[in-house]
Image (spheres, rainbow, N blue to C red):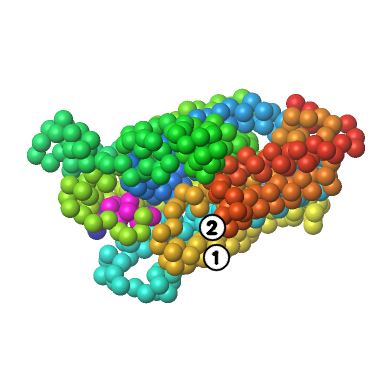
Amino acid sequence: MTTDLLVIMAYFCAIFGIGLYAGRKQDSLESYALGNRSFPWWAILASIIAAEISAASFLGTPGEGFVLRNFTYVQLGMGTLLGRIIVGQLFLRPFYRYRVVSIYEYLEKRFGRTTRRGASLVFLLSRVLASGTRLFFAGILLVIAYTLLTGKQDATAGETVVIYLGALSLITVITTIYTTLGGLKAVVWTDVLQACILAVSVASTLVFLILGIMGEGTLTDAWQSILATISDTSSNPCRQEPLQPWVVFDFGITGCGFMQDLKYILGNEYTVWSALLGATFITMATMGTDQDMVQRMLAARDSSTGARAVIVSGILDMPIVLVFLACGMLVFVFFQKQGIAPPTKAIEIFPYFIIHHLPAGLRGLLIAALLATAMGSLSTALNALATTATRDWYRGVFRPDATERQTLLVARLSTVGFAALLIIVGSLTAWYSVMDPTIRILPIALGIFGYTYGSLLGIFLLGMLTHKRGCDSGNLLAMGTGFLAVIALELLGHFQLIPPVAFPWRVTIGTLVTFAVGALFPTPQPADASN
């Protein structure tokens, strides 16, 4: 473990050094939140990738590969690329035109102050819940490492939750320190470092797995072993032909008629249709209406630079997901070949493999990579939450006459305050996970956005696709209706009154309902945010 600790300590020293260096000469909210709009596109690209590959993706995507043993999750990459192209070409131009720091300022210019505050509040609540939930996933590996080092394998549920609380607090405190000191400059440049660590660690893990499966044989023997070991467990009861291992595209054809096909498509998370529609809307929402992601693109010198970064990140998304899914599938083969019984909790499979079966040094590198992904997502969430709260509420509502120095101080204090909130949400998620060991990691992490982000996306699209529709009062009604529509569908599915609707469709449905209701109301004066 000494080698692992040295690797992890070297990582922490590097990010603290970057945070301290980046924090120099910050004298305004714009320098803290956007780094004076001076980042090259490749740095923004690395930051987007590092933030996207959160701890939920780092652990959850291999978990999906381990459980499903196919590549159907990759289908969502088609929608994520299409959504990023739309964001790059449609959303960024008006944001840059008005030189916004908080993207919700655009809504005030297009509709009015009430719409801006409503959307900002929705973002703050959604991001706290989503980032707090994702924070829990980062603690899984630390908890497993703790039980390994202490030999405390039979901890009670209450003791396990306390261990999670300690792990989450440690990660959050470290991240908060360098984020508070360095602002977005610290976030982006540590993300570049984190992306590099991630690439090296995952590539090394793939090599280790292939060599472990190969044993004394050849690469051909290893490939034959992989083909022979992976079996299908993802068949649908109504399918004439079950999904086969390695399959990528699922068109949702069950062979039982149109209505059964529609039920399967709406209830299944990974189909071609959920990719082309559901994932496109999710990406537009997360990349175009979420201050967390857009803030990186606004840190470029112009909209074309930001658009290049976000579109290239979409091109790289599918191969990155393929690699993580392959890790999970190879872990399955490795466990079968070695006769290893995996943990009963699906979300602990990949971290269990990291802690118990990787050699020293590589294990430390992968732990550092997990911490990097967790801290990368957390740091930008904290920076975005603090920026939105300060710009939209402190400066926009309570203290419009605040000086830049006062505003910067409030932004830094807000960063600390939101860190505390995220620890609370992450701890509650840990408690829920301990009580329900069958919980799946990705539907929770991605599904939270589905309840509220449709409302946000619907209003932004209303502003950007129309010039004379939408107003403050109508927008609030539209956002509320979109939210209630998603909740109603979820409740009806839960009580089996209608077939359940999978998480990729929630944002789509919420967006369409919000847009339709908002379009019923005319804009009381000519729009000044035309595209």
At label 1, which amino acid type do we have? Ile
Q: Horizontal placement of 418 versus 521: left or right?
A: left
Compared to residue 311, the image places residue 126 above or below, namely below
Badge 2 marks a residue whose secondary structure is: helix
Image quarter where the C terminus lies is top right
| Residue 181 seen from this side | no
Predominant SS along the magenta part: helix
Q: Which residue is mark 2?
A: 132
Q: Which label number is shown at residue 424?
A: 1
Q: Nearer the viewer, residue 369 or 72?
A: 72
Q: Horizontal placement of 174 versus 460: left or right?
A: left
| Residue 525 seen from this side | yes
The span picked out in magenta is 347-356
Q: Which label number is shown at residue 346?
A: none
Q: Nearer the viewer, residue 498 or 515?
A: 498
The extreme left residue here reads 216
Q: Horizontal placement of 260 versus 524: left or right?
A: left
Image quarter where the N terminus lies is bottom left
